[in-house]
Image (tube, rainbow, N blue to C red):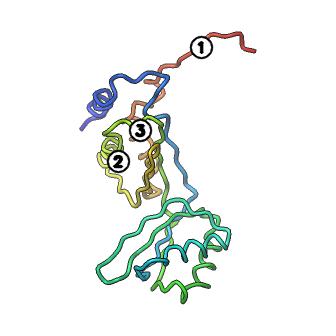
Amino acid sequence: MTDNEVNQSMGDLFPTLGPEDPVVAGIAHDRSEAQITLRRIPDHPGVCASVFTSLADAGINVDMIVQAAASTGTADVSFTASEGQIREVERALDEQKEALGYESYDIDTEVGKIALVGVGMKTHSGIAALFFRALSEHNINVLMISTSEIRISAMVPLKDLDDAVRAVHTAFSLDAAQVEAVVYGGTGR
């Protein structure tokens, strides 16, 4: 699909939007996060609570969290934290390895986060499809996904982050050349 076809898709999905109620307000990105994956952690109630309590007790702020359960009674749990807190993450995980019961952990600092934000996303279908299609068409692999009613976040390889931002920006018609400014009159006071 060409950029023009992607832009046309945006118009087809959201034909009645005006400047007062944008579906997508903007795109954010972050180069300073790391992805941490705990491998083969026991898959039973309370384990994730223990993991994230240990991290909280160490003062570590966690952003995205994904769990993938295996049929072996274990799971892999991935989360993101600030790259600046990696030493604290390692220390907390190492100190709690026996209590948490994980086999190993990986830390990847060559990741970046792109987030699409907008209040109108919760009432319009097709947002996720367009977001992931834009990344796919630029051959950008998604490593991790997190969503809420007003946000879609994806971790991508750091080397692809700038291309991801441009691709999603274009797909949602947020390019500077395409955005019309709305000016409201007033006294300026």
Nearer to us: label 2 or label 3: 3
Compare residues 176 and 40 and report the one nearer the observer: 40
Residue ID for mark 2: 135
Please state which amino acid type lies under the numbered disc 2: Leu
Indicate the secondary structure of the residue bearing disc 2: helix
Q: Is residue 12 above or below residue 134?
A: above
Nearer to us: label 1 or label 3: 3
Q: Tell me the distance, in whole angstroms, between the alpha carbons under discs 1 and 3.
A: 25 Å
Would you say the residues marked 1 and 3 are in contact, meaning their CB atoms lie under 8 Å apart?
no
Would you say the residues marked 1 and 2 are in contact, meaning their CB atoms lie under 8 Å apart?
no
Quadrant in the picture for the N terminus:
top left
Q: Is residue 179 above or below residue 42?
A: above
Residue ID for mark 3: 121
Task: Tell me where residue 52 sits by quadrant.
Answer: bottom right
Indicate the secondary structure of the residue bearing disc 1: loop
- x then y, percent, for residue 83: 60, 64
- x then y, percent, for residue 35: 50, 66
Please state which amino acid type lies under the numbered disc 3: Met
Q: Is residue 9 left or right of residue 49?
A: left
Going by the picture, which residue comes out furthest to the bottom? 98
Q: Is residue 93 left or right of residue 186?
A: left
Q: Residues within 10 Å of mark 1 (few under 14, many from 20)?
A: few
Residue displayed at 43% across by 33% down: 23
Q: Tell me the distance, in whole angstroms, between the alpha carbons under discs 1 and 2.
A: 35 Å
Q: Is residue 8 above or below residue 165?
A: above
Disc on the earlier residue, 2 or 3: 3
Disc on the earlier residue, 1 or 3: 3
